[in-house]
């Protein structure tokens, strides 16, 4: 034991001793750089976004706002399946804005309660909305066609026949 102590004393010069002591104590703070994990299982709210053709709205930006808040409570990107997952706090009313760089997006409000398991589906609302848009488009086209028929004068076949005859002009 005495021999190892002499080796340690001889191997480290007096000038390097503070450096060696500093490194020794600094190694004690190395666990401060660790990352700890904790697995919690709770009832989360899942928002599933898809394009009109059923393709997932994958890896697009979103902002989640609590009711009455101007700053987003949560921001991020949807996952590969187009989902946004969060654990609501005491706030019941939420608003989500999702948007892509090519201009597609959604801005909807919904209600979610903490710890409450429910499935809220807007597919019926979206189907009605899509059907009403198609109906509106058909009605606009029909209205344009009717306006065209009213304002564009067509010659009657009798007028055209009399206009072509040279004796009818005199």
Image (cartoon, rainbow, N blue to C red):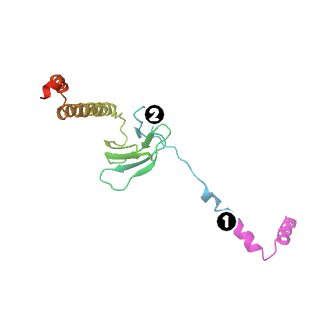
In the displayed structure, does residue 2 sit left or right of residue 91?
right
In the displayed structure, does residue 94 sit left or right of residue 24?
left
Residue at point 75%, 69% (across, down): 20
Dot 1: within a 10 Å radius of its alpha carbon, few (fewer than 14), some, or many (20 or more) residues? few
Q: Estimate the x, y position of residue 19 in percent, counting from the top left.
A: 73, 72
2 vs 1, front mark: 2
| Image height of 72 relative to 153, above or below | below
In the displayed structure, does residue 76 sit left or right of residue 142?
right
Give whichever of 61, 103 is nearer the camera: 103
Give whichever of 141, 12 is nearer the camera: 141
Callout 1: SS? helix
Residue at point 43%, 42% (across, down): 84
Q: Estimate the x, y position of residue 97 in percent, counting from the top left.
A: 37, 47
Kindly report the secondary structure that dominates the magenta region of the rendered protein. helix
Q: Estimate the x, y position of residue 89 in percent, counting from the top left.
A: 37, 48
The stretch drawn in magenta includes residue 14: yes
Direction left: furthest residue: 170
Q: Estimate the x, y position of residue 105 in percent, counting from the top left.
A: 39, 43
Direction bottom: furthest residue: 15
Give whichever of 133, 97 is nearer the camera: 133
Quarter of the figure with residue 141? top left
Quarter of the figure with residue 132? top left
Residue on which disc 2 sits: 55
Disc with the residue nearer the chain's start (2 vs 1): 1
The stretch drawn in magenta includes residue 51: no
- Residue numbers of the magenta segment: 1-23
Callout 2: SS? loop
Image quadrant occupied by the C terminus: top left
| Image height of 111 relative to 126, above or below | below
Residue on which disc 1 sits: 26
Give whichever of 125, 137 is nearer the camera: 137
């Amino acid at each position: 034991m005495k021999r190892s102590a002499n080796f340690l004393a001889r191997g480290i010069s007096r000038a390097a001793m503070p450096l060696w002591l500093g490194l020794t104590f600094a190694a004690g703070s190395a666990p401060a750089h660790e990352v700890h994990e904790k697995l919690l299982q709770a009832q989360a709210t899942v928002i599933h976004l898809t394009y009109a053709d059923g393709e997932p709205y994958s890896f697009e930006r979103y902002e989640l706002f609590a009711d009455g808040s101007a700053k987003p409570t949560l921001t991020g990107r949807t996952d590969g399946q187009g989902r946004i997952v969060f654990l609501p706090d005491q706030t019941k009313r939420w608003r989500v804005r999702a948007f892509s760089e090519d201009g597609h997006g959604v801005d909807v409000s919904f209600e979610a309660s903490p710890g409450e398991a429910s499935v809220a589906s807007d597919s019926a609302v979206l189907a009605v909305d899509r059907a009403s848009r198609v109906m509106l488009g058909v009605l606009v086209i029909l209205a344009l066609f009717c306006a065209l028929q009213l304002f564009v004068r067509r010659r009657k076949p009798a007028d055209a026949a009399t206009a072509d005859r040279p004796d009818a002009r005199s």
